[in-house]
Image (spheres, rainbow, N blue to C red):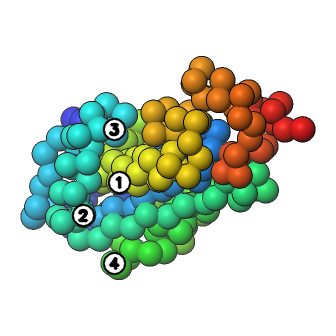
Amino acid sequence: MSPAASSVNPSRLIAGIDEVGRGCLVGPVVAAAVILDPAKPIAGLTDSKKLSEKRRAALADEIKVKALAWAVGRAEASEIDRINILQATFVAMRRAFSQLAIKPDYIMVDGNRLPGIACPGEAVVGGDALVAEISAASILAKVARDTEMDVLDRLYPGYQFAVHKGYPTKTHLSALAELGVSPQHRRSYAPVKKFLG
């Protein structure tokens, strides 16, 4: 299958679903659901991690204008700590799906498991680089979460959230050691847990 090409019957409404932030130590896990309009193709859709920040932002704007429907859902750090990251990811995906203004006929979800949505669908490993709808969801989720990290960076100066976006980089771990755990950190994650009193 060619990159970012839809693999199912084009007459069906397909929602692509993807998440961002599973491996982060801070903030929510964010998911997006997108139903693209076959009459308004968007060039350059691929896995959000393969795109520059500027290109992602431009594509996110284009997706919001051209898609038939799109929505973003989230699960907070406190929810992740309570129910674990996999279940919280599914919660975020279900929340994104539930907010779609149009209900699709079929869902395609990045990964190897479906999130428990009452709609026919399939999980696609590496789908964010293979299926246009999932690529679009990946981009919206990434831009939404990165924007949130910029906000947290201003609320909690010193952690440099705007730089590492919450991932467990050397800079982030050094800041945790120096400043301690912020209210937005995921306390159930091992690298954070060791800095709790």
> Is residue 26 placed above or below 93 in the rendered structure?
above
Q: Are marks 2 and 1 in contact (CB under 8 Å)?
A: yes
Q: Which residue in the protein does label 4 denote?
A: 102
Distance between the alpha carbons at the discs numbered 3 and 1: 11 Å
Q: Residues within 10 Å of mark 1 (few under 14, many from 20)?
A: many
Query: What is the three-letter code of the residue carrying label 3?
Result: Asp
Q: Position of residue 152 (x, y in %)?
A: 53, 50
Q: Which residue in the protein does label 1 denote?
A: 140
Q: Quadrant of residue 71?
A: bottom left
Identify the element where label 4 is drawn: loop
Viewer-nearest residue: 113 or 177: 177
- Residue beneath the point at 21% across and 35% down: 2
Q: Quadrant of the N terminus?
A: top left
Distance between the alpha carbons at the discs numbered 4 and 1: 17 Å
Total tally of numbered discs in the picture: 4
Is 162 left, or right, of 167 in this rendering? left
Which circle's residue, 4 or 1, is located before the other in the chain?
4
Q: Residues within 10 Å of mark 2 (few under 14, many from 20)?
A: some
Query: What is the three-letter code of the residue carrying label 1?
Result: Leu
Query: Comparing marks 2 and 4, which lies closer to the viewer?
Result: 2
Query: What is the three-letter code of the residue carrying label 4?
Result: Ile
Circle number at residue 64: 2
Distance between the alpha carbons at the discs numbered 2 and 1: 9 Å
Which circle's residue, 2 or 4, is located before the other in the chain?
2
Viewer-nearest residue: 60 or 181: 181
Q: Position of residue 153 (x, y in %)?
A: 51, 45
Q: Which residue in the protein does label 3 denote?
A: 47
Is residue 105 among what the camera can see? no
